[in-house]
Image (cartoon, rainbow, N blue to C red):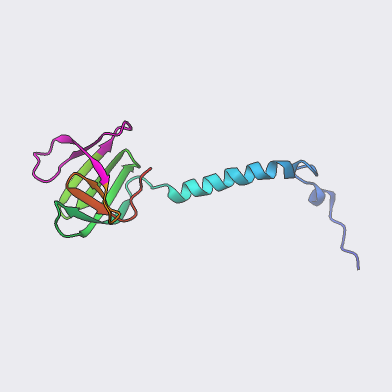
Amino acid sequence: MDPLPLPAARRWRAFPPGKWWPDAPVLLVVLGTLLVSAAWAVPEGLLIPLECRLEQGPWQDCQMRVDQVGAHWWLLIGERQLEFRHDGSGTVTMQGGPGEGGGWRPVSSRWEEDASLCWNGICAKGDIPLD
């Protein structure tokens, strides 16, 4: 038994035959890029659970609040809020660090062997969004 013929409106194609396939790889790359970007995007104000350490003390639960990935973030360690800014030139500044009066001061960033990221005496490890 032959299938019933479709009405003309249902047989219409959005792309003429032969036109769709040359553009398909470009469309797949664009869609793939969007999906990967969405997967790594960090919504503003998101709290990311991490482990933090102050001045070689014990590791403790903390959170990172991201305002702008790689440019402006906070570490929330207990009652303490440490604010960080990165200006894009490689300089990171911090406000509210241990033993400080609360002013902004430059800090050096470094990776430790245990995969923690440290800014002077403050270290964090976990799923840290970098950029």
- Picture quadrant of residue 6: bottom right
Magenta stretch: residue 92 in it?
yes
Instruction: State the image quarter where residue 102 is shown.
Output: top left
Name the residue rendered at 58%, 43% in the picture.
30
Q: Nearer the viewer, residue 79 or 9?
A: 79
- Compared to 13, does 52 lie above or below? below
Q: Quadrant of the C terminus?
A: top left
For the point 14% across and 44% down, the residue is: 97
Q: Which residues are magenta?
A: 85-110
Q: Position of residue 1 (x, y in %)?
A: 91, 68
Judged left or right of residue 103, residue 50 is right
Residue 35 in the image: x percent, y percent?
Answer: 52, 49
The correct choice, above or below, for 15 with respect to 49 in the image is above
**Which of the pair 76/54 is nearer the observer?**
54
- Residue lying furthest front: 113
In this view, the residue farthest toward the right is 1
Q: Which of 50 and 125 lies nearest the eye of the viewer?
A: 125
Is 128 within the magenta? no
Q: Residue at x 50, y 49 (%)?
A: 36
